[in-house]
Image: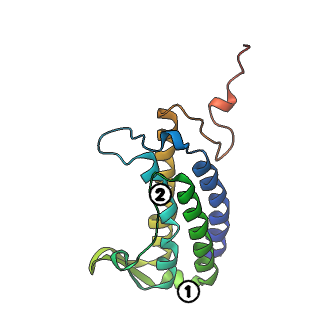
């Protein structure tokens, strides 16, 4: 039952993430709201990369990020990031389809270079926190980036504030 809900949420949110990445304009790919922030392109690439982590989360008991090599392309190439997203969504979908309810209860650990940075904890909790909620956090950041750079924000859960405003006669 939980896995069925995760799969349905995954499919719904893939569409929202796609809309958001399609709204990232090439002209503002290097925009960053502060000196310590990622550029819009780096943030978009990170969002696309999160989908890659589904495979390591659902197929390995210990997932070492540093041992995993993913070809990302340049963060300044939004088309490459969109292609990365689509490729990673397919990998994530396969991993989710292969998962079982019992596998959600199994402990999972994330390491970087052999050093544990997350877990051990039940894979289901990892799916919610490390994958789903992590993704939503960064999508929220991207919405702020888009607005701060004067771009339109797509409606992810219905119309945006701007879409609900009366049109001015011009």
Which colour style is shown? rainbow
Image quadrant where residue 94 sits? bottom right
Between residues 6 and 21, which one lies in front from this camera angle?
A: 21
Check disc 2 and report its element: helix, strand or loop: helix
Disc tally is 2
Between residues 79 and 155, which one lies in front from this camera angle?
A: 79
Provide residue 67's location: percent of width, then percent of height: 35, 80
Instruction: Classify the position of the N terminus by image quarter.
Output: bottom right
Check disc 1 and report its element: helix, strand or loop: helix
Provide residue 65's location: percent of width, then percent of height: 37, 75
Left or right of 96? Residue 54 is left
Q: Is residue 15 above or below residue 64?
A: above
Name the residue tied to disc 2.
Answer: 45
Image quadrant where residue 110 sits? bottom left
Q: Residue at x 42, y 53 (%)?
A: 42
Provide residue 57's location: percent of width, then percent of height: 47, 77
Left or right of 72? Residue 109 is left
Q: Residue at x 42, y 86 (%)?
A: 61
Instruction: Classify the position of the C terminus by image quarter.
Output: top right
Q: Is residue 149 above or below residue 79?
A: above
Q: Is residue 61 above or below residue 111?
A: below
How dense is the environment of label 1, judged by Cα within 10 Å: few (below 14), some, or many (20 and up)?
few
Between residues 146 and 111, which one lies in front from this camera angle?
A: 146
Report, in whole angstroms, how far the alpha carbon at label 2 lies from the one at label 1. 32 Å
State which tag comes first along the sequence, 2 or 1: 2
Name the residue tied to disc 1.
Answer: 102
Left or right of 8? Residue 128 is left
Q: Residue at x 41, y 81 (%)?
A: 108
Image quadrant where residue 165 sits? top right
């Amino acid at each position: 039952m939980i896995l069925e809900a995760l799969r349905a949420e995954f499919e719904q949110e893939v569409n929202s993430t796609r809309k958001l990445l399609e709204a990232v304009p090439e002209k503002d790919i290097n925009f960053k709201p502060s000196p310590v922030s990622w550029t819009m392109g780096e943030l978009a690439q990170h969002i696309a990369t999160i989908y890659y982590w589904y495979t390591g989360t659902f197929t390995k008991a210990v997932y070492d990020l540093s041992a995993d090599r993913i070809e990302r392309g340049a963060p300044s190439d939004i088309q490459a990031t969109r292609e990365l997203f689509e490729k990673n969504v397919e990998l994530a979908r396969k991993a989710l389809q292969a998962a079982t309810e019992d596998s959600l209860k199994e402990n999972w650990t994330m390491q970087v270079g052999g050093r544990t940075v997350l877990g051990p904890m039940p894979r289901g909790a990892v799916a919610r926190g490390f994958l789903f909620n992590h993704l939503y956090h960064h999508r929220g950041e991207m919405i702020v980036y888009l607005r701060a750079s004067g771009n339109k924000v797509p409606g992810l859960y219905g119309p945006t504030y701007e879409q609900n405003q009366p049109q001015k006669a011009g």
